Structure formats: C-alpha cells, structure tokens
Image: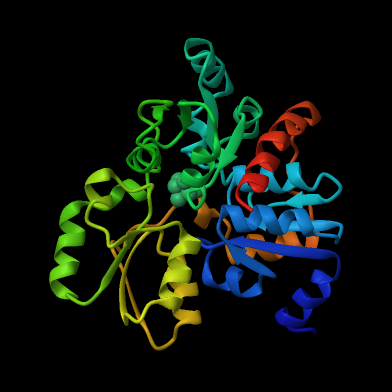
Amino acid sequence: MIDEKTEIERLKKDCIILAHNYQIPEIQDAADFVGDSLGLCQEAKKVDKPYILFCGVDFMAESAAILNPGRTVLMPELKARCPMAAMLPAAQVREAREKHPKAAVVLYVNTLAEARAEADVTCTSANAVEIIKALDEEEIIFGPDKNLAWFVQQRCGDKKIIPIPAHGHCRTHILIKREDVLELRKKYPNGEVLIHPECTPEVQVLADRICSTEQMVRRARESQGREFIIGTETGLLHRLKKENPDKIFIPALKKMICPTMKMNTWEKFLIELRERKNVVRVAPEIAERARRATERMLELSK
Ligand code: SF4
C-alpha cells in the first residue's frame, strides 16, 4: 500500500493545490502555494495544469475560476461559504450605484461573483488603499466590510467612502476586543502588535501596524522584533512559526477561528484530490464582468 505523501504527490501531477493562510496546517503543508486573497488570485492565473484544488472559501475559489477559465477549480467543501461575502447581494450594489451615480464601485474580493460583476474594480485588504488612491472619482462605494472601509477612509481623506451594507463585517475578526490587546501588551511589552483591518476600529487603533495576512508574514520576516501579537485568524500562526522558528507569535485571541475556513478538513481534502467532484461554477456572463473588475485590480496593484 502506498503512503499518503506518495499518493498526494502522484495526484498532484495534474493538479495545483492553492491554500489560504487560514487553512489547517496539514493542508498548508501539502499545498503548492499558500497565501492571501491577492497572492492566490495571482497564482491562480498562472496555473497551467488542468485542475486547481482551492482550499479556502467560495469567493476565493470563484476568483480562481474567473481568472483562469480553462481550468477546473475544485474545493474540498463546496459549503464553505463566507458569511461576510453573503452580506452583499448584487441588487444592493446596483441600488447604491443609482443613489450615487458619480461614485466608483470598489468591492473587496471577499464578495460573491454576482456582486463583483457590478464593480468597477475589486481590491484586497493588502491593496485597498493603493487601488482607491489610483481612482479619479472622489466618492467610492465600498463593500462589504465596514471595518476595512473605516481603515481605507483614514488613509484616503480626500475621498468619501460609502460603505455598503452598513453592517458588513467578518464575524471572526470582530471577536477581538480592546481588552484582549491591552492585556497582551502588558504581558508582552516588547511584542509588536499586528492587526488585520477587518478588526473593529477600536482594536485597529491599538495596533503597531495594520496588515493583511501577507503583510504580517513580511513584517515578521523583516522586523528585528522577536515577539508578535497576531490579530487575525489563528491559521496564519502555522506559517509564521514555520517561516520564523526563532521568533514568538502570540494569537491576539485564541478562539479567533473561522468556522467556514475550517470546513475544509484533511479528510475532505484527500477525498477531493482523489475524486474531483466539487467543481466551482460561475455563470459565464457573471464571470466575464467579474473578471474585468478583478483584472483591473491586478493591473492597478502591480
Ligand atoms: S475569516 Fe471572515 S472574511 Fe474570511 S472567510 Fe471567514 S468569515 Fe469570511
């Protein structure tokens, strides 16, 4: 009987495995590429094997299918649907456009393909400020995360950011409270506090740096510091520790675990790699329009 590792290597001959930074350690270790939404979009575009096994949530796998339509995109669990992405239906984007006809529509990639098809450009937490600064419009309709909208507004004072929906949020990132960070600052006075912009403004203001997951990875590598308090989904700690074995990483909140990301279990991963049944489909007319908005993001963030 062949061992699991040998079997995975054999199954990967016609399949690239892409995994988000919040996936379980075993999946991250088996992947060809681990990264944030932006990095995963860029990698998905380059894939030349017939299959992509995308280990993340629905909107990310949709991005891969949209950017590389010649490949079959699979997910270990098709029910891994991001609740924040589901907060913004396409009709609400159209309504906002009617209400603010002069505004550009910038949507976080954490949005379903139907809504993204209504956008002028998409963005990630790593490039949201850069994208918005590059636009001529003074008014920006931005969704679905109100906390990322707040972060962007602080850095783009000459623009008016209009968040849609008013209550959009990531249920995992809003779990961290001010007290959690203040307590850890007392316990680790030399620790650098890195906070994700999906956290609430009250928590963001306590950060040494507000970073996307990939920016956290870079900062941990480049900083002279030895201790880091990490304010994002705890899946990222695996990569941080693996890449920086001599540094210490403390989760800002241990229970900051996204249940949707964790629906991709090791068992489901293996089954999908073998059986290839969970195909991600995006209607061609939606994909075509959403591709334009996503390609524009990739051009503007070069
Ligand atoms: S961490 Fe938040 S934004 Fe990311 S998939 Fe989970 S619920 Fe969605």
Considering only vertical position in the picture, is 30 above or below 124? below
Residue drawn at x 32%, y 41% is: 154
Q: Residue furthest top?
A: 98
Relative side of 205 to 162, left or right = left
Vertical relation: 264 (above or below) 244: above
Horizontal side of residue 61 vs 141, given as left or right: right
Residue 108, image x and y in percent? Answer: 52, 39
Residue 252: % across, % down: 28, 63
Q: Looking at the image, can residue 76 be seen?
A: no
Residue at 14%, 65% (x, y): give it.
183
Identify the coloring: rainbow
Seen from this angle, which residue lies furthest bottom?
246
* Residue positioned 62% across, 45% down in the render: 300
Give whichever of 179, 162 is nearer the camera: 162
- Report the front residue among 164 and 17: 164
Q: Nearer the viewer, residue 148 or 271?
A: 148
Rendered position, 267 above or below 135: below
